[in-house]
Amino acid sequence: MALANTLSAVVLGVGARVVNVEANIGPGLPGTYIVGLGDAAVTEARDRLKTAAQNARLGWPKTKVMINLSPASLRKHGTMMDLAMCMAVLAAQDSAMDIAHVMFLGEVGLDGRITAVPGVVPAILAGAREGLGLAVVPEANAPEAASAAPSGFTVLSARHILDVVQWAAGQVELPAASSNGPRIRRASSISNEPDMRDVIGQPEAKRAAEVAAAGGHHFMILGPPGSGKSMIARRFAGILPDLDEDARRECQSIASVTASDWHRIPFVAPHHSVSKAALIGGGSGRPTPGAVTKAHHGVLFLDEVSEIPAPVLDALRIPLDQGKVELIRADGNTTFPARFQLVLAANACRCGAAESSDCQCSARQRASYLHNLSGPLWDRIDILVHTHPKGKLHDDAGESSNTIADRVAEARCRTQHRLAQMGIAVSSNAAVPAGRLRRELPATPDAMALLESYLAVGALSQRAVDKTLRLGWSIADLAAAQQPNIDHIAQALEYCGNAKGVLV
């Protein structure tokens, strides 16, 4: 009887957990048996691995082979553990292989080739948390794995199980994985990416996007077709500040699980026919991340928002408030991170007329337009800005995304420095708790008097006052001011007052 074990991982939500893979060769009815609550993809590995080993001329035991995936109470899924199971069985035949502290990730094909799997990044991070220091991954997953691996963690890449067996026997060296680019960066720093300079005119809308980026505010753009709404929204991620180390790793984990681009700040723009499950996550069986999770630390852009059903849009309310989605199932709860900036775009009316005098909509159609946006959702939109039909052929004064992004980054630095000095553990003005906002972060006395006057006549609600004050701080940070003054608050009232429909 021979026993060997090695390590792998299983993806849970957008994280992972280390799995101990044990293989025992002993007397009994010949065959390969896999235990440990594996799904069909896991149990079918017995046939894939046996055929792969035979095709690679490595041999496969002709007696009973028992593979155990521990912890046995944890449900396993997918093909990430293929390579680990194969190596455990082969190591049980060859006592010279010492692979007990190595993490193996990858799917094994019938010819022995090791193919890419989703979720390598969270698996590597889970291994590092457990004190592991070495992993072997498919060659196709090597760049993302190397980019996410913490200091002191070695990642090796392999193409074929024969290479891995020879490495485990000390006969060859596997190449160390290397990243093919920076971990995550803003789109404006990547060549051939859409640039804000491409948007001709619309200075008010571009300014509103800059304020939103500086303060982490959600915003909406209304305007006629072809006026630049989608162009501005699709370039918004390019003016966001770079992510810190923790945010980068979270984004990379999500990108690894969802097979998304892990080189840039997330930008997710689902079609307006998106379902609730596709938007916030879920689905039958094992829950999968939705658009709000894919946009974590990035941008969720909903174009033609007037066409999205109200129940789907209302599902955004909890993620916008809590920064996460918690899905409850009979076999357990799954929590997906969902801290994003929401950008909405729509025509000003159903016919999309450039001027109100040209509108062909009935009074009922105009009154019911955008009725799918509930009051609570409107309340979470900080900025409402309009684009105008009148434009021009050229805009020599148009600024590039890099220029705007530099100002946004400087404003965010001022925000973070101020909040850190005050012991407020957030990184943007939009996230400052309301309880500390008015008490510790007021505007100048005349600006606060202006807000109080609007509040006294009912033109602003208590929440709208907080929203205006947060926007005022974002505008002040862009202007390098020490405190929002009455001009900054007046600009903020124009932005968020429109969103409440009181100052149009």
Image (tube, rainbow, N blue to C red):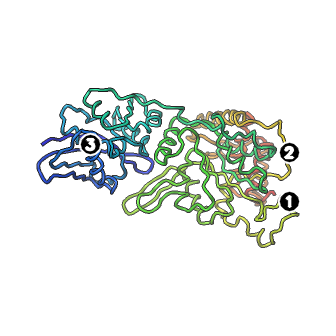
Kind of residue at disc 1: Glu
Lower sequence index among marks 3 and 1: 3
Q: Pointer 3 and pointer 1: residues touching (CB < 8 Å)?
A: no
Q: Is residue 56 left or right of residue 216?
A: left
Residue in view at x 71 percent, y 39 percent = 195
Residue placed most toward the observer, 496 or 274? 274
Give the quadrant of residue 211.
top right
Residue 253 point in image, percent of width and height: 47, 43
Say whether marks 1 and 2 touch (CB < 8 Å): no
Is residue 26 shown to the viewer in this render?
A: yes
Residue bearing the label numbered 2: 392
**347 in relation to 2, above or below:** below
Looking at marks 1 and 2 on the same chain, the residue that comes earlier in the sequence is marked by 1
Label 2 vs 3, first from the N-terminus: 3
Return the x and y of residue 437 as percentages of the image width and height: 65, 46
Which is closer to the viewer, label 1 or label 2? 2
Residue 422 screen position, x and y as percent = 60, 37
- Quarter of the image containing the N terminus? top left
Amino acid type indicated by mark 2: Lys
Q: Give the Cα distance between marks 3 and 1.
A: 71 Å
Q: Which residue is mark 1?
A: 355
- Callouts 2 and 3 close, C-beta under 8 Å: no
Question: Residue 53 bears which disc, if any?
Answer: 3
Looking at the rendered structure, the secondary structure element under dot 1 is: loop
Residue 248 appears left or right of 140: right
Question: Neighbour class for label 2 at 10 Å: few (<14), some, many (≥20)?
Answer: few
Residue 486 appears anywhere in the view:
no
